[in-house]
Amino acid sequence: MKIIIAGAGEVGFHLAKLLTNERQEIVIIDLDQSRLNYVSSHLDVHTVRGSSTSFKILEAANVAKADLLISVTSSEESNLATCIVAKNSG
């Protein structure tokens, strides 16, 4: 299963860790490159730097082929916007 996680903070990292243990294909999106570097050095995941509310960034994460998108950024508005944009992207 292909899963996209928006947000590489504590919650996003923990979710990615649990899901990679289940052999899921994970893509993590975040604005902070240092967080992405930390996640990719500890877990077998793909990372995309940018805003998850951007069509371009979601396309780079291949959202149209994702089975699940989980948005766990620190901003509730960003989480809702990410889900809306992802839904409209397919």
Image (cartoon, grey):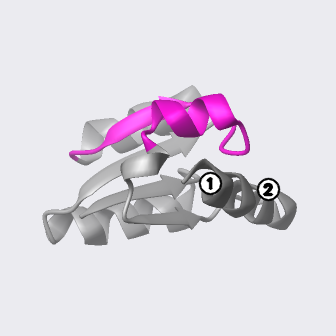
Q: Are marks 2 and 1 in contact (CB under 8 Å)?
A: no
Q: Could you say which is closer to the camera, residue 74 or residue 29?
A: 29
Is residue 11 in view? yes
Q: Residue at x 16, y 68 (%)?
A: 21
Category of crowding for the residue at label 2, using alpha-carbon neighbours closer than 10 angstroms: few (below 14), some (14–19), many (at least 20):
some
Indicate whether residue 72 is drawn in magenta: no
Q: Residue at x 21, y 45 (%)?
A: 44
Is residue 32 in view? no
Question: For residue 78, which numbered disc appears in the image?
Answer: 2
Q: Could you say which is closer to the camera, residue 83 or residue 14?
A: 83
- Give amino acid for label 1: Ala
Span of residues in magenta: 44-62
Helix, strand or loop under label 1: helix
Quick check: 86 left or right of 64?
right
Q: What is the quadrant of the C terminus in the image?
A: bottom right
Identify whether 52 is placed above or below 12: above
Q: How many marks?
A: 2
Question: For residue 86, which numbered disc appears in the image?
Answer: 1
Q: Earlier in the sequence, mark 2 or mark 1?
A: 2
Q: Residue at x 41, y 67 (%)?
A: 14
